[in-house]
Amino acid sequence: MTNDQHTKLYVLEKSDSYMCFPACLNMIFKRRGLRVFPQQQIAYSLNLKVPLSMKEKYPDAQFTEIEAEWGVHPNERNLLEEFINKNEIKLSLKYVNARDIPSSSIMDFLCDNLESGNDIIVGYDYATVFQDGLNVGHVSLISSVDDLKNLIILTDPEEVQLVQINVKQLIAGILKDSSGFWVFSSPNGRIFTCYL
């Protein structure tokens, strides 16, 4: 089954340095007609960590020279849920670690959630997925899937474009980064998570 009819079209927002997650959130907010926020405001709420060389650009961030820690950390201490609740954003959220879904069921998980109108941010290792660049954590929005061809279309905030990726390539990148999916639904919407 091809799920092009469930393609999510987002108003593209380019991410600033270390701001891929905040840019993805803003694209979801725009699609749903919700208030958007400055990327830095979101990032500071999600424990932004940057190298000391970025102190002038991000004075309220935490500083570290450990490259693997650079960026935001939405799963730390429920920071993303706190941001959503504090700002009265009318969304439900569920984080699903990719290791909790059998690889053979990932496409079903994505199709079911897209068909339900949910938005999905996926975390992965950049170099593993794009076979270029650095081995750093990155996120994109999943815009659509074609399960006949095992393809996933990502809306990438860094490239500011749609990118077509083979599902096996994406799964390898997700597992390398020990990441998963942030699924957003309407407050009374259904988030599909059980695929054992």
Image (spheres, grey):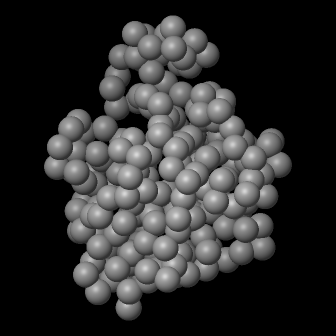
Residue 172 in the image: above or below residue 134 = below
Q: Is residue 4 visible?
A: yes
Residue lying farthest left? 131
Residue 178 makes an appearance in the image: no
Q: Above or below — where is 120 with respect to 30?
A: below
In the picture, the quarter occupied by the C terminus is: bottom left
Q: Residue at x 37, y 66 (%)?
A: 153
In the picture, measured across the screen, residue 39 lies left or right of residue 12, that is right
Residue 32, position as x, y percentages in the image: 69, 61
Query: Which residue is drawn at the image coordinates 64% and 59% (left, top)?
Result: 31
Residue at image point 17% right, 43% down: 132
Rendered-image quadrant of the N terminus? bottom left
Relative side of 151 to 97, left or right:
left
Q: Nearer the viewer, residue 33 or 70?
A: 33
Residue 126 screen position, x and y as percent:
28, 45
Pick whichever, 184 or 16, lies toward us.
Answer: 16
Q: Residue furthest bottom?
A: 1
- Rendered location of residue 165, percent (x, y): 27, 64
Task: Write down the quadrant of residue 43 in the picture.
Answer: top right
Instruction: Say which residue appears at 80% left-offset and 42% top-offset.
Output: 86
Pick the front one: 55 or 26: 26
Foreground pick, 150 / 97: 150
Residue 137, position in %: x, y? 36, 41
Total marks placed: 0
